[in-house]
Image (cartoon, rainbow, N blue to C red):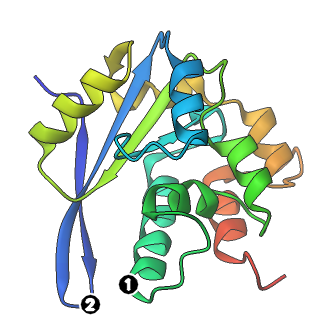
Amino acid sequence: MSLTQSQPLQLHDQATQVHVALWINVSNASELHQRLLGGDTTVNCALINPEAVVDPFQVMVAVHRAAEALEQQQLRTRNIYSEIVYNLSPNKSIKEAFTRFGLNPTCKTILAVRVGGSQEAFDNEVGATIVGEPAALERLSSVTSLDKVRQYYKLPANTSNILNAAVGAMALKGYT
């Protein structure tokens, strides 16, 4: 049984699937981080540090923005997967986005995201890439650090709807 969640992505005339999977007890984050830094294109997905992700909807917003940028040939980063990580950030600093939202060498949990392809192929390829245990996406909240979310998105402690505030900050990137 797959623990991957797949959702449709509709862009203008094209429709595809977005696959999202949570991995816990990851033991090869340092190796994956080095591969990403080296521009390894065999890592065919976004690898996100889920500590600052409140809900899969937040990821879907970043995916949609990245897909739009790709379609309009306006990527600010190397590819759609690094663009997804970049679009999770509320500001325009690519370095800061990768530091806060991207995979780091000490990650024990990873949120893997792929645009397109089949769920089965995604499961097989990510399973061969990440050394860890797949987990239900419903467990995302147990690895989210609300303190980091508040810090990264500059949210006051009394923010009642953190997801809406985070997505709003992402959407306003470049306009504030």
Relative placement, left or right, of 122 versus 73 is left
Mark 2–mark 1 CB contact (< 8 Å): yes
Q: Residue 9: x percent and y percent? A: 27, 69
Considering depth in this image, is 54 or 107 the residue closer to the camera? Answer: 107
Give the number of the mark in front: 2 or 1: 1
Residue 169 vertical position relative to residue 126 in the rendered view, above or below: below
**CA gap, disc 2 to disc 1?**
10 Å
Residue found 61% across the figure and 53% down from its top = 163
Residue found 25% across the figure and 77% down from its top = 10
Residue 16 vertical position relative to residue 106 in the rendered view, above or below: below
Disc 2: CA contacts within 10 A as few (<14), some (14-19) or many (>=20): few
The residue type indicated by label 2 comes to His
Residue 113 vertical position relative to residue 154 in the rendered view, above or below: above
Quarter of the image with the C terminus is bottom right
Q: Which mark is residue 71?
A: 1
Residue found 26% across the figure and 22% down from its top = 128
Relative placement, left or right, of 8 versus 99 is left
What residue is pinned by disc 2? 12
Residue 95 vertical position relative to residue 75 in the rendered view, above or below: above
Helix, strand, or loop for circle 1?
Answer: helix
Say which quarter of the image contains residue 166.
Answer: bottom right
Helix, strand, or loop for circle 2?
Answer: loop
Residue found 48% across the figure and 14% down from its top = 26
